[in-house]
Image: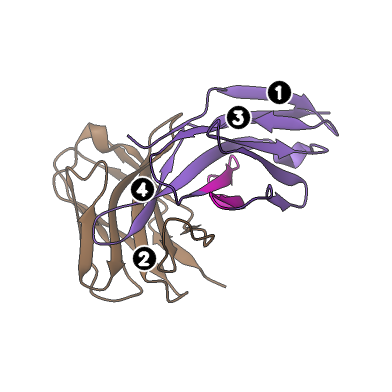
Amino acid sequence: AQKITQTQPGMFVQEKEAVTLDCTYDTSDQSYGLFWYKQPSSGEMIFLIYQGSYDEQNATEGRYSLNFQKARKSANLVISASQLGDSAMYFCAMRVFRNQAGTALIFGKGTTLSVSS
Amino acid sequence: NAGVTQTPKFRILKIGQSMTLQCTQDMNHNYMYWYRQDPGMGLKLIYYSVGAGITDKGEVPNGYNVSRSTTEDFPLRLELAAPSQTSVYFCASSYATGSYSNQPQHFGDGTRLSIL
């Protein structure tokens, strides 16, 4: 069965430090996409970064990078130089095929990141 | 720059009442989705649509219905509200994509629904 696992319910980090949020996935598909979303306390879902299963290089978007280890089926999010505004819930998600030739995302349970000054 | 718009933002229903959560997008996306997020959990797919007139069930469809008569609109209907349907509901949309596509889903701001 296709599944996303985030094993860290909460993470704590100080400003300017780097932090890694873990994500492992399970799929038998060869072609898939992995996403990270940020959900601040205000509730909206903000897309951060994407990694495709065939991408040879790890994705980067500003202070966000994705440590993709395909053989281990892990796609960890690394946030460098944490800021107070990074305090939020972070979700890892995988795009999977559905019926009717459509695709949708399956989500992990999320990790709450708290950044302190 | 409207993106995905959901109404209402908050609603309290009594058990057994019905209501429709509205969702509209102005990005000409083919795919639209409804998710629910229970406290402390990730999002779970309720229904999705790959185009006008085409809908299909997700992981947790029981107690809900959808329709897609236009590209822009994808309303979610609760017929007989139950306490188990207390949740935050998110509508999302994206371009038609394969599983490998880098096109993200764009989310609305959510509807917080309480059933009492």
What is the crowding at mark 2: few (fewer than 14 residues within 10 Å), some, or many (at least 20)?
many
Asked if residue B116 shows in the view, the reply is no
- Label 1: which residue? A12
The range drawn in magenta is A34-54
- Label 3: which residue? A22
Residue type, mark 4 in image: Tyr
What is the crowding at mark 1: few (fewer than 14 residues within 10 Å), some, or many (at least 20)?
few
Q: Is residue A39 left or right of residue B43?
A: right
- Label 4: which residue? B35
Mark with earlier residue (1, 3): 1
Quarter of the figure with residue A86:
top right
Q: Main secondary structure of the magenta part?
A: strand
Contact, CB < 8 Å: mark 1 with mark 4?
no
Where disc 1 sits, the SS reads strand
Q: Colour of chain B?
A: brown
- Chain that appears purple: A
